[in-house]
Image: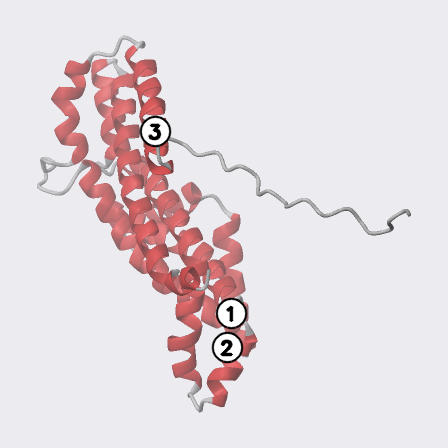
Amino acid sequence: MTSFLPPPSQPVRAPAVKRHVLSFRVRLWLTWAAMLGLFVALFLSLDLKLAIVADKWQYLIGLRLSPNGFLQGAALTLFLCVCSIFCSMALGFATALARLSSSAVAVGVATFYTSFFRGTPLLIQILMIYLGLPQIGIVPGAVSAGIIALSLNYGAYLSEIFRAGIIGVAQGQRDAAAALGMRPSVTFWQVIVPQAMRTIIPPTSSQFISMLKDSSLVSVMGVWEVMFLAQSYGRSSYRYIEMLTTAALIYWLLSLGLELIQARLERVYGKAYVNQR
């Protein structure tokens, strides 16, 4: 008698998981070490005169003051960036709130500002502030002009990042806060902003790293930051590659510092999402 019962099902085996002897973090650092070794080997093959680097690196880092007693090198670059970061954040946040307001004048001013400073080169903006303002009786210093230009330029970009982060929070969060009787201002600062920070931090950190590199454009005004010193020492010794390589390494190390701060902030504002996994 033929049986119409289906054959017994075979137990489904889970796919074999490939196990590595070394952890992911160890393999990651080994990859970085290999890439760094190749990078160093490439530049050593260029017949660099390291004695020139050893003689000038203190000035490039900023361990010594300039002849007029002010900061120079990486110390001045950090000063420019820190001042510009706080000013651009305040300006970007105010512009984002203006874009989200119901005032036509506020929206018009905010959109005009962001359109102009996002649509024109930063170098032109630096020169317009440094060379153009004296024609109307305002004479800013080179450092002040650099901070103003960087703040205005990156404030325009940050305003769009802040606005996107704020409107990216679900409307249900606002409705839930209103149902609990929270005032709009309390809802904004305690509900909306903390959730928006998770979206805001990565692109904002990228903008700050770009600002760090774009601060080299301030060298056109004779500011003694890293790029200006690298070009000056390279011109005087006819060894540009040594000085430019040192400047690139300094910018890279400063950028790594900002990346570490970004990673720390992402962990702080992403705790709630990690716990939900």
In this view, the residue in front, 137 or 131, is 131
3 vs 1, front mark: 3
**Image position, residue 158 (x, y; %):** 43, 57
**Residue type, label 3:** Trp
- Helix, strand, or loop for circle 1? loop
Residue drawn at point x = 17 percent, y = 38 percent: 72
The answer to whether one can see residue 13 in this image is yes
- Height in image: 48 above or below 55? above
Residue of label 2:
173
**Image position, residue 7 (x, y; %):** 77, 46
- Helix, strand, or loop for circle 2? helix
In this view, the residue in front, 237 or 43, is 43
Number of residues whose C-alpha sits closer than 10 Å to that of mark 2, classed few (under 14), some (14–19) or many (20 or more): some
Residue of label 3:
32
Q: Is residue 167 left or right of residue 27?
A: right
**Image position, residue 67 (x, y; %):** 9, 35
What is the distance, in whole Å, between disc 2 and disc 1 at their CAs?
A: 7 Å
- Height in image: 206 above or below 59? below
What is the distance, in whole Å, between disc 3 and disc 1 at their CAs?
A: 36 Å
Residue drawn at point x = 25 percent, y = 14 percent: 239
The circle drawn on residue 143 is: none
- Height in image: 60 above or below 208? above
Residue of label 1:
169
- Helix, strand, or loop for circle 3? helix
Residue drawn at point x = 31 percent, y = 9 percent: 45
